[in-house]
Amino acid sequence: MSIIVDKISYTYEIGTGFERQALKEVSCVIEKGEFIGLIGHTGSGKSTFIQHLNGLVKATSGAIYYDGEDIYDKDFDMRKLRSKVGLVFQYPEHQLFETDIFKDVCFGPKNLGLDRAETELRAFEALRLVGLDESLYYQSPFDLSGGQKRRVAIAGVLAMKPEVLILDEPTAGLDPKGRDDILDCVKKLQKETGITVILVSHSMEDVAKYVDRIMVMNDGILMYNGTPKEVFAHYKELEKIGLAAPQVTYIMNDLKNAGFDVDVSAITIEEAKTSILKALGKK
Ligand SMILES: Nc1ncnc2c1ncn2[C@@H]1O[C@H](COP(=O)(O)OP(=O)(O)OP(=O)(O)O)[C@@H](O)[C@H]1O
């Protein structure tokens, strides 16, 4: 699996007074098994971008290649693309509707035309991957906590066996514990299945310790695209566009400026602690 995005631009409401260019010549490559954080403030173009990846929105100009195939070619199978690139929208729990959790997760594979045995096998596997306790499978989704409902919604997409899982703000509206639980769960299932994950967020702090690569969108432009360490090195520029780097980045840079020989690229508290102790001459 690979996705090549070649200079895509997208304008909403072309030719009306409300015309708005949401993407400006965005190019990038997404490889199998990557865990990518797509970051940007409100209105920067994140949602528009991810909807291009499964063909829900068609670029005004530019091209997208999925496994080398041009998705805008007239013979390209868009339905297949949609089953390969699973998109979990913001607040996906609002789309749960079946009488029990298991039925809800079965809905997607059943719709793909799979037989009952295969459908149920996939539902069990998906529910296991999101770490939902078996005792809950036959309960109404409406009796669950916010975080649990969201897991059911993610399981519903996983049951379609996508190659790419895109999550739009999966932590929105959850408390800090619920936020960590969901992200830990996504990281775990990503490791176990090798699926490619694109996680949309407006918080660097949230995604820093989970992702391999960060793509920063600003006003429709892909401004940075690199490892968290590479991207956070631009913390001053990020601040100018309303995106704060993780707090650790600020502490380490302040210490460096105060004359301590610390590693400014530390991202986690653990890395920072090790570097500070070393600079202080302790083990
Ligand atoms: N259906 C639409 N019609 C017109 N303009 C739109 C539409 N959807 C989005 N836009 C505009 O396109 C730009 C990019 O929006 P988009 O939703 O992609 O940003 P975002 O980064 O996902 O924001 P958020 O974090 O709020 O979801 C914004 O200026 C937005 O107002």
Image (cartoon, grey):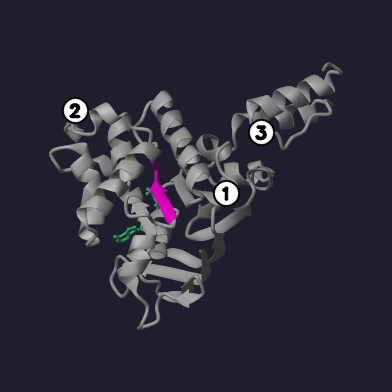
Image quadrant of ligand 1 equals: bottom left
Q: Residue furthest bottom?
A: 74
- Tell whether position 22 is magenta: no
Residue 118 percent location from the top left of the image: 27, 53
Q: Of residues 138 and 199, which is closer to you in this image?
A: 138
- Magenta residues: mostly which secondary structure? strand
* Residue position for label 1: 214
Crowding at label 3, few (<14), some or many (≥20) Cα neighbours within 10 Å?
many
**Residue under the image location 12 percent in, 39 percent down:** 99
Residue 120 percent location from the top left of the image: 25, 47
Labels 2 & 3 near each other (Cβ < 8 A)? no
Which secondary structure, mark 3?
helix
Name the image quarter holding residue 257.
top right
Q: Which residues are magenta?
A: 164-170
**Residue under the image location 43 percent in, 60 percent down:** 49
Q: Nearer the viewer, mark 3 or mark 1?
A: 1
Badge 3 amino acid:
Thr
Residue 204 percent location from the top left of the image: 54, 39
* Residue position for label 2: 143
Q: Of residues 240 and 228, which is closer to you in this image?
A: 228
Circle nearer the N terminus (1, 2): 2
